[in-house]
Image: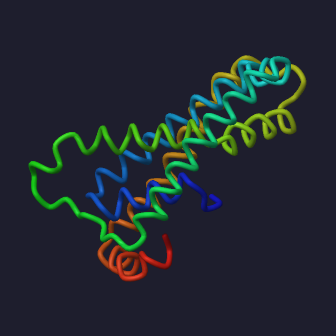
Amino acid sequence: MSPGPSFVVVSRIAVAGERTDGLAAAIGMGIGGFIFATIAVAGLTALLVQVAWLDIVLRIAGGAYLLWIGIKIWRGANEPIEIASDASQRVGSFWRALRRALLVQLANPKTAIFYASMFAAMLPASPPPWMLFVLPPLLFLNEFVWYAVVAFAFSASRPRSAYLSTKHWID
């Protein structure tokens, strides 16, 4: 729940769009969490430890994407957020929000490292198969519920107004 790139993206999507866009972003974050959890329980994290160059390439690519998002936000700090009110502007916004959130989640090395270290520390050496099947959907729910709360909060009128009035400083 620590604020990071995922929090920023979901909150901005919820402010600029409708609540459904924010929920789409929450779904994207959940899917990303599911993917990382699946990779972690499948032992592919151990593969990345063994194949150092692949780990480095993935970290650099993910970091470059997050840096690009940060630069875009910083450069646009003085520009107002366009709030889509016209139905023609809203076509496909659900899928755009889901895709953007998913890409941010997958590009965030913190998420992968967190899940890998959590599983390494908390799971028994030989976990039962049912546990390996239950963990990814549970982590999807965890990510989705948290970011749905963020989306609901930032799509409400008071938090939206508060953010829009302080956007320059926050960004």
Relative to 145, 57 lies left or right: right
Which of the 4 image quadrants contains residue 129? Answer: top right
Relative to 118, 37 lies left or right: left
Q: Position of residue 139 (x, y in %)?
A: 60, 39
Q: Name the residue at 19% across, 59% down.
A: 84
Q: Name the residue at 85% across, 33% down.
A: 120
119 or 133: nearer the viewer: 119
Q: Quadrant of the N terminus?
A: bottom right
Which of the 4 image quadrants contains residue 153? Answer: bottom left
Which of the 4 image quadrants contains residue 17? Answer: bottom left
Above-or-below relation of 19 to 25: below
Q: Position of residue 112 (x, y in %)?
A: 69, 37
Q: Position of residue 71 (x, y in %)?
A: 51, 57
Q: Name the residue at 66% across, 29% down.
A: 58
Above-or-below relation of 133 to 77: above
Q: Name the residue at 47% across, 38% down.
A: 102
Q: Position of residue 110 (x, y in %)?
A: 69, 45
The colour scheme is rainbow
Relative to 171, 118 lies left or right: right
Residue that sits furthest to the front in the current view:
75
Question: In the rendered picture of this protein, how many numbered marks are placed on residues?
Answer: 0
Relative to 62, 171 lies left or right: left
